[in-house]
Image (cartoon, rainbow, N blue to C red):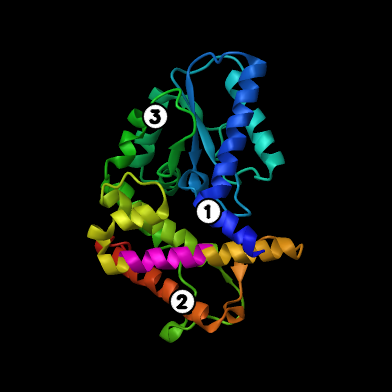
């Protein structure tokens, strides 16, 4: 099991394996179906784009076309890759962020993202939030023009991201104590940290995609101390989830993000408390900075 942990830690190997599988599926489809009707870029979203896959990650991807394709080529390409990744062990995205739905020309993408950034609705903010985590896997077209709106620092977008980051309360009780029983590492720790990294990375004009690098580059905005605390906490939360999921797989249990802190050694138990304290501190700063209570 130790060896599995080391393999999964090394250089985002889970994401690298998923990258290779996706490229293989795309190449196989092109070989069978022939040349595409227009140049395209297959882009990765979410944890796959960030290089932060885990044992229960789902699929997140989209298609950017040089011009809108006609016929069924785009749908057939998306279906082939989605089915192949599902057989590879990556389940379909519950939120529908996959290339069978999100497949447009670069020009149409620019319009869609502009509307999402400027729209006041929570659903629009969720979409914009998702597309802040993006990494082209194939380079058939330049996606940068379509993504320009996401770097615009729209006050509405920043406020929406701040509200989202503060919508995940930490599990700490009074005096910073951890609760008895299991905690959900994703909902109470990993998700809010990813959201905080997106928010402050955007404010710091960071072009990074990974959570750790965004937090590092956001230090001038967040402060060095809080940036370092969040980075250390995220590394711990990621490590704990991975080890727990590998244990669940080894024991043929259902793979979840839940873990009982009381089962941890004393030093990791205290480090977990500190990780949640750092998140709470950042959320307090966010509440004041972006006035999320209004």
Q: Position of residue 214 (x, y in %)?
A: 35, 53
Task: Mark 2: give few (<14), some (14-19) or many (20+) Cα within 10 Å.
Answer: some
Residue 132 found in image quarter = top left
Give the structural element (helix, strand or loop) at label 2. Answer: helix
Give the structural element (helix, strand or loop) at label 3. Answer: loop
Comparing marks 1 and 2, which lies closer to the viewer? 1
| Residue 78 in view | no
> Is the residue under label 3 in contact with that under label 1 (CB below 8 Å)?
no
- The residue where tag 3 is placed is 143
Q: Position of residue 50 (x, y in %)?
A: 46, 47
Comparing marks 2 and 3, which lies closer to the viewer? 2
**Above or below 147: residue 140:** above
- The residue where tag 2 is placed is 271
**Can you tell which mark lies on residue 10?**
1
Between residue 206 and residue 247, name the one nearer to us.
247
Give the residue at x 65% y 24%. 28
- Give the alpha-carbon distance from disc 1 to disc 2, as whole Å: 22 Å
Magenta-drawn segment: 227-238
Position of residue 237 in the picture relative to residue 80 (left or right): left
Image quadrant for the C terminus? bottom left
Q: Position of residue 185 (x, y in %)?
A: 54, 66
């Amino acid at each position: 099991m130790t060896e599995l942990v080391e393999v999964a830690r090394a250089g985002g190997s889970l994401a690298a394996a998923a990258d290779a599988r996706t490229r293989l599926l795309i190449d196989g489809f092109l070989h069978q179906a022939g040349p595409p009707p227009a140049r395209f870029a297959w882009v990765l979203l979410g944890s796959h784009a960030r290089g932060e896959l885990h044992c229960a990650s789902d699929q997140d991807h989209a298609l950017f076309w040089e011009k809108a394709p006609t016929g069924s080529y785009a749908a057939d390409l998306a279906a082939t890759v989605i089915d192949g990744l599902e057989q590879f062990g990556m389940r379909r995205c519950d939120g529908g962020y996959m290339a069978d739905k999100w497949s447009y020309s670069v020009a149409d993408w620019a319009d869609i993202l502009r509307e999402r950034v400027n729209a006041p609705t929570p659903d629009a903010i969720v979409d914009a939030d998702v597309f802040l985590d993006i990494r082209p896997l194939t380079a058939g077209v330049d996606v940068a023009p379509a993504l320009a709106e996401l770097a615009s620092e729209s006050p509405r977008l920043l406020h929406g991201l701040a509200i989202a980051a503060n919508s995940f309360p930490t599990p700490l009780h009074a005096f910073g104590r951890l609760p008895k029983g299991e905690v959900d590492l994703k909902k109470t720790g990993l998700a809010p940290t990813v959201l905080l990294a997106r928010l402050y990375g955007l404010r710091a004009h960071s072009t990074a995609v990974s959570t750790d690098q965004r937090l590092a580059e956001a230090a001038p905005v967040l402060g060095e101390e809080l940036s370092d605390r969040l980075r250390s906490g995220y590394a711990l939360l990621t490590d704990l989830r991975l080890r727990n999921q590998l244990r669940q797989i080894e024991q043929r249990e259902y793979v979840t993000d839940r873990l009982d802190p009381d089962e941890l050694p004393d030093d990791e138990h205290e480090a977990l408390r500190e990780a949640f304290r750092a998140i709470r501190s950042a959320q307090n700063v966010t509440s004041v900075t972006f006035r999320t209570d209004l």
